[in-house]
Image (cartoon, grey):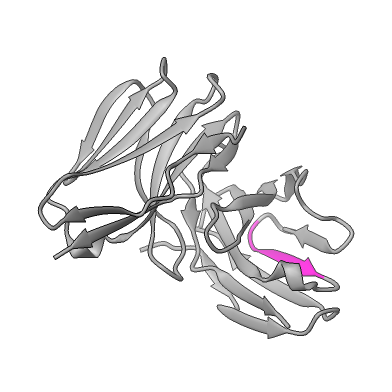
Amino acid sequence: EAEVAQSPRYKITEKSQAVAFWCDPISGHATLYWYRQILGQGPELLVQFQDESVVDDSQLPKDRFSAERLKGVDSTLKIQPAELGDSAMYLCASSYHRGGELFFGEGSRLTVL
Amino acid sequence: QKEVEQNSGPLSVPEGAIASLNCTYSDRGSQSFFWYRQYSGKSPELIMSIYSNGDKEDGRFTAQLNKASQYVSLLIRDSQPSDSATYLCAVNNFNKFYFGSGTKLNVKP
């Protein structure tokens, strides 16, 4: 069964360090999303790609977060420097087209000490 | 006002009962609606999508949409302990998804 791949599953880092997450969407899915989910809350969109282009990064804290999807397939989300408040689950999702059903990867749980 | 509102629960139902989960949304122009199940520590898993007014059934699950009232619900029939999870409502509005904070469901054996 096709699925969204994410790594690492867990990451513990100290504040001010850099951290990166990787996502490989379901094959053929043109739209890729990065969400952040804090415990007890729903996922909140960080950035949305259509192929290799960013279509929405209005909620991405651009002073410390960056995201890319260079060839329109896999994607990397980077945080530098990490802050205590960045501790959360980082979820990647993909859909066949914009507005279509989202399918999530297993997520990357970040703990910043 | 949040885009999507859900009662956080917990909603407790006995095994075999019907669980009813509700969600309201603020933007009348929203086009499509989704229910996700999320087990503790895991990622959301799509249960159902619904696009037009009325009911949509899939096995033990029924999604109901009332656009006039801006209301989406999920019914789970014959609830099982394995249904115990947080259920997230998501609304798509012009290709932007908004998630509620989820309702925690406990199914007691």
Whether residue A76 is in magenta: the answer is yes
Left or right side of B106 for A15? right
Q: Quadrant of residue A98?
A: top right
Residue B2 image point, x, y percent: 60, 36
The residue segment tinted magenta is: A73-79
Residue B32 image point, x, y percent: 46, 30
Question: Which quarter of the rendered picture does the N terminus of chain A lie within?
Answer: bottom left
Of B62 and A39, nearer the camera is A39
Of A23 and B4, nearer the camera is B4
- Determine the residue positioned at 52% across, 36% down: B4
Q: Quadrant of residue A21?
A: bottom right
- Determine the residue positioned at 76% across, 73% down: A84
Please indicate, yes or no, whether residue A100 appears anywhere in the rendered image.
Answer: no
Seen from this angle, which residue lies furthest right?
A63
Residue B83 image point, x, y percent: 25, 59
- Determine the residue positioned at 72% across, 50% down: A52
Residue A102 drawn above or below residue B82: above
Question: Which quarter of the rendered picture does the C terminus of chain A lie within?
Answer: bottom right
Whether residue A54 is in magenta: the answer is no
Q: Quadrant of residue B94?
A: top right
Residue A86 drawn above or below residue A55: below
Residue A69 image point, x, y percent: 72, 58
Left or right side of B40 for B109? left
- Determine the residue positioned at 10% across, 53% down: B16
Please indicate, yes or no, whether residue A69 appears anywhere in the rendered image.
Answer: yes
What secondary structure characterizes most of the magenta part? Answer: strand
